[in-house]
Amino acid sequence: MKFTYNWLKQYVDFDWSPWELAEKLTFAGIEVEDVHNLGGNIPDGVVICQILSSEKHPNADKLTICRVTDGKTERQIVCGAKNYKVGDKVPLALPGVTLPSGLTIKEAKLRGVESQGMMCSAAELKLAKDAEGLLILSADAPVGKKFSEYLGGGDTVFDVEVTPNRPDWLSVIGIAREVSALTGKPLKLPETSLMEDTEPTKKLASIKVEAPDLCPRYTARVIRGVKIGPSPAWLKETLEKVGVRSINNVVDATNYVLLECGHPLHAFDYNLLNEHRIVVRRAKKGEQLTVIDGTRHELSPDMLVIADAKRPVALAGIMGGKDSEINDKTTDVLLEGAYFLPSNIRKTSRKLGLTSESSYRFERGTDIEGLVWVSNRAAALIQQLAGGQIARGLVDALAKPIQKRRVKCRFAQVNRLLGIEVPPATVHMVLTALSLPVVAADANACEVEVPTFRVDLEREADLIEEVCRIYGVEKIPAKMQPATVAVSEFDAKWDALARIRQVLTALGFDEAMNQTLVGEGALKLQNPLTTDQHALRPSLVPGLLANLRFNVSRHQYDAKLFEIGRVFAVDGKESLHLALAATGRRNPCAWETGARGAKLDYFDLKGAMEELADDLAAPGFGVAEVKQIPLLQAKKLDLRDAAVVVEMELEPLLTAARGEKQFRQLPKFPAVVRDVALVVTESTTHADILAAIKKNGNKNLEQVELFDIFSGGTIPTGKKSMAYSLTYRASERTLTDAEVNEAHEQLKRQLERMLSCEIRDS
């Protein structure tokens, strides 16, 4: 948002310098990004002149002799530039002036010809780093005017960054309201009295709002007999100082009011509207509109348009149509003022890639109640600049009565939140100065009726923030708070996550971090930023497989990756997962030829997960093999070797890992080892056998280790032999052979019963 120092002073009388103003606004919460002094350091002795004639220098091929006028005197200037022509207007430095470059101009003879000053380039005036030739000004530059004044000298442009919750600051009056509160000076609003004709507006224009949910209020005025022409100098200069191009008096008036009041308006050529009718409706499917910047857009039913009796004439809140814009032949104007639903304007603007000063404000919310005042202000200004007769009254389509919020502010709560004592009278004064009317008050609190231009005020804390801003943030003393070590439930979880990363990294895995948004998934976004990221990921596995594919395509065939991240179910439930993926060789750096070529398989990831569970001391943790995974069946991965993946919900593991490890003394008594070989069906797993052994419940069975799996030979078809080494040890004494033999035989009989297996002879 840009405004000028002099423009702001029209609405509130203050005596701060531009730099003091910037500091005060910053402390009040309005971030000032740039302060630019127009005219720079150009001295008064630089004026605008016009070149009357030019002829070749008699003694120098590269010089010319020009006759110029500064509005009072004709002068002879020797010039070395080539980029000008007779009739051009340029800056002229008069004798005696010192330029910003440090050069002092004197009357002197150049190659025998007297020169009474110097025509200047932009570089010589420090307006540009480099410049070729003279600075050629516009044809309407006033001859004799001080060049610093022509550039806006004596004025300063402010560029402020406005947060989305403060649309009232997107106007000069909004900024002036803040300065008024800070200085205690009254806010002076412009006059909006109208000289209306006798014929009512409602007889000249028909207004119908078919989408009141998207346009809660629409107003229209008609001004007939206007004369389109250039704007007066004051208006052109005001707009150009803040970067708005002057177009004509009517369009400039609407742009001026937009910047002044923060509420966009639009002027239609009344005679280009079919049947002089306005219909506010949703666009029809496939309907097209060419807007005033010349671009053509295909519309959809979720977009709001302003139409006449036959076709769309504007894209509501964003940009007017080319076929109904004000032009040199316009004589009658229909002035639109409306309130549009911010979310719809934002959605349409993003979808079409079309933004404007209007859409920027409508997206953030404009003042629905102040709409009539703004319309009157613009109509009066158009009449002042372009003449014409304003039809009596305005058409006002208001969908429902305007409801205002009331917010209570307790004085004790003000003091508690700010940490200082603010007198109740001061609280009352600050709120009133910000145009927040106090409708009720007692010794303990006051109640404010929130005006519609303050969309950000919803609760008591918002009012207290207003008091803080205006009363002065600098008045709140800095206090050193005591340092305390906070204990959070999340600390243990964070430590466990760090430990998981450490363990997996030690096992040779690299961590991957992929996007939460993916191209495929059941949980789709309504308004995705890109077409290839329009869904929330249901699993970590696709991202890791894409990482493997990326590595293999670059001849990195051996990869072991893990990722910790959020995944999302169809019902929207969010959970933290851990996934591992690996492909290629188990140990590519091994020195033995056989070991170096061995491929990763299911058992590598199973072992990694079991190692992780053991390190975290998570009891009851197990890994099961799954061979039919739809995700892996559906895609061709283009990998050299098989890929192995594992994925799990991490919260149960983190919960189990929060206990501390228990110290156990080294055994004092010797162990006794016995072996057993079982002939079981092919479908029997190691986990099945461990479960059966555990069910035996022998307290002296310390360790079970699988050391051989064998099939074929004497083993029947469909079966296999699994050999185990069992370690027995008592913690309080040495076991006898008889005790161990009895326990071992009992275990074998239980395995035969539970697994229907055959015990092989040792």
Image: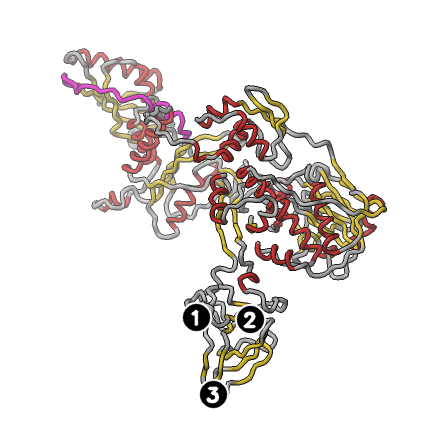
Q: Give the label, 1 or 3, closer to the camera.
A: 1
Horizontal arrangement in the rendering, residue 511 relative to residue 347 (left or right): left
At label 3, the amino acid type is Asn
Residue picked out by circle 2: 90
Q: Quadrant of residue 700?
A: top left
Look at the numbered disc 2 and give the secondary structure of its residue. strand
Magenta stretch, overall SS: loop
Q: Can residue 168 be seen in this snapshot?
A: yes
Residue 239 percent location from the top left of the image: 61, 55
**Label 2: few (<14), some (14–19) or many (≥20) C-alpha neighbours in 10 Å:** many
**Label 1: few (<14), some (14–19) or many (≥20) C-alpha neighbours in 10 Å:** few
* Residue closer to the observer: 311 or 633: 311
Residue 277 percent location from the top left of the image: 80, 47
- Reading the chain from its start, which is encountered first: label 2 or label 1? 2
At label 2, the amino acid type is Val
Q: Is residue 39 above or below residue 684?
A: below
Q: Which mark is residue 59?
A: 3
At label 1, the amino acid type is Thr
- Reading the chain from its start, which is encountered first: label 1 or label 3? 3
Horizontal arrangement in the rendering, residue 689 relative to residue 139 (left or right): left
Q: CA distance from mark 1 to mark 3?
A: 24 Å
In magenta stretch: residue 495 = no
The magenta stretch is 648-671
Look at the numbered disc 3 and give the secondary structure of its residue. loop
Horizontal arrangement in the rendering, residue 182 relative to residue 201 (left or right): left
* Residue closer to the observer: 494 or 310: 310
Q: CA distance from mark 2 to mark 1?
A: 18 Å
Residue picked out by circle 1: 104
* Residue depicted at x 57% and y 43%: 175
Q: Quadrant of residue 731?
A: top left
Q: Are marks 2 and 1 in contact (CB under 8 Å)?
A: no
